[in-house]
Image (cartoon, rainbow, N blue to C red):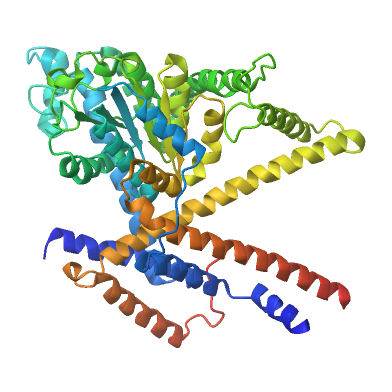
Amino acid sequence: MNAILNFISRIGQLDRRWIFLIIALVVLVPLYFPLGLPIRATESTKQVWEAVENLEPESKVLLSMEYGPSTKPELHPMVFGIVRHLLKNEHKIYITCLWPDGQFMAEDLIEKVIEVEFPNKSYGEDYVLLGFRPGGEAVIKGIVGNIRKLYTVDARGSAVNDIPMMIGVNKFIDFDFLFSASAGFPGTVEWVQYASDPTGVPMSTGTTSIQVNEVMPYVQGGQVNGILAGMPGAAEYEALIGVPGIGTSGMDAQSIAHIVIVLFIIFGNVAYFVERKKSQKY
Amino acid sequence: MSGELIGAWIAVFLTLAIFSYLYKDNAFYKIAEHLFVGISAGYWTSMFFWTQIQPNLFGRLWPSSHYDSESLWYGIYNAMSWINSSVFPAGGIDKGHEMHLIYLIPFALGIMMLLSVFDKLSWFARWGIAYTVGMAAGLRAYGYLNSNVIAQVRNSTLNFSDPDMPVFALIGNSYFNGIVLLIGTIAGLLYFYFSKEQKGAFGKVTRVGIYFLMVSFGASFGFAVMGRISLLIGRFVDLIAYNGTQYHHATSWILVIMVILLGYSAYKNDDPKGNTAE
């Protein structure tokens, strides 16, 4: 018994660099040797899928990309999944960006998904990149009030008046659905507050894991139709649309890393109590 | 050597340099940190000038659609164009805007904010800050009141006469969720009521509030860990990709060189106490 207690006590004093190394290994190994652990969609992910699936054909969908390279691993896979689903169901996609980096992410999305997997879809008729406009929530207010005043040209320099799919799109209520891929401010919260709630246009969202707690009350309250929560949310969406992607490939590493972290937390707590008991004894 | 190849090597170096901080503070980490701060500041300044100030401010003050070389207003513009023709191109700025001279007000407020660098004129900056704070407060007051207070209260209200309301549901309205929400909200709010000592029956209710707060913090921590692991996976996926033959095994080479140099530095033992990452 003493040997076990001493071992646990030693674990509690382990140099944190060993823990970093173990975490690195448990993340790296499943990336090289995937285990194929099952992925089950949560209720909130199913809600997003159903919201997209139930849209009328040729619906106008505003896709707002509020993230950059720092949160790309979490949000890019879910945007890929959403766009695949939307284009498969013949919807029109209007891409806006509240973050400057979002425009690079949008260009990457067009290059890697739309142009490769949907070559029959044409720019300006099936999808358009309106691009980044600075101003945060003021941009959202601008889109709600008069999108044409805010966007006179798209990200490629074409006059918005000359873009065929912009016919009949003058303000936010002309859209049928909004999907916000958000990594922080301005993002999903601002879209709810200044666009979706005041106008009643339905919206769904995909956020970084750290933002989920902030957005979840809107989902629970019915103001947002579901949420894709971080990389697991993306993987679940990929499973629902039947197209495995970057999200799915990262889930084995994610699951195993979580188990190891939970074990470390348990060992850490046990070691703390063992140490405390020892110090009380002497 | 293609641009993509150089970019891959730089990305690998910067990623591993940042990771090297987990071993201990070192020169590689310092290089990456300084580059990040400098490039971020430069990038954001440039981005905001060319996407906001030049097209949306100058583009509305001197639009090409109203260009008149004889007028005094465009005479000023032409003088600025002579100084810098990329910001003020000849013939006015063509960004699809009409002329809006009311934009002189934000222009003036912006200049007043920049005056904060001069001690004697720094008080001008308060005007710009006052406008920004007032506008943001007004805008957000409406948003939070409408979506976070009124809508949340309305959506979490239990309708006992609704026959379709389930007793239990994982997400959305149910009797169970509604009651938990009600107890959690009241108990949580009472915990922050400091005008009465938290003991007796009141103390027991606030204790329940603490438990709800702890569950909330636990969920936040769990999501934070999940997010960080996701980002780590993202970097590892890139490092694996950049270790391919088309990138000349950039990850392996840089990792080996970095480990050798850090090992040599540790051998020299510049810091006998061995500062570790905090």
In this rendering, would B73 be left or right of B25?
A: left
Residue A64 picture quarter: top left
In this rendering, would B26 be left or right of A129?
A: right
- Vertical placement of B232 versus B104: above or below? below
Quadrant in which the N terminus of chain A is drawn: bottom right
Q: Where is residue A152 drawn, in percent x and y?
A: 20, 21
Residue A36 picture quarter: bottom left
Q: Where is residue A124 drawn, in percent x and y?
A: 15, 27
* Residue most extreme to the front: B163
- Vertical placement of B166 versus A262: above or below? above
Residue A91, visible in the rendered structure: yes
Q: Residue at x 19, y 32 (%)?
A: A155
Q: Where is residue A12 drawn, in percent x and y?
A: 67, 73
Residue A206 picture quarter: top left
Q: Pick the residue in front: B157 or A89.
A: A89
In this rendering, would B171 be left or right of A118?
A: right
Residue A135, visible in the rendered structure: no
Quadrant in which the C terminus of chain A is drawn: bottom right
Q: Pick the residue in front: A94 or A154.
A: A94
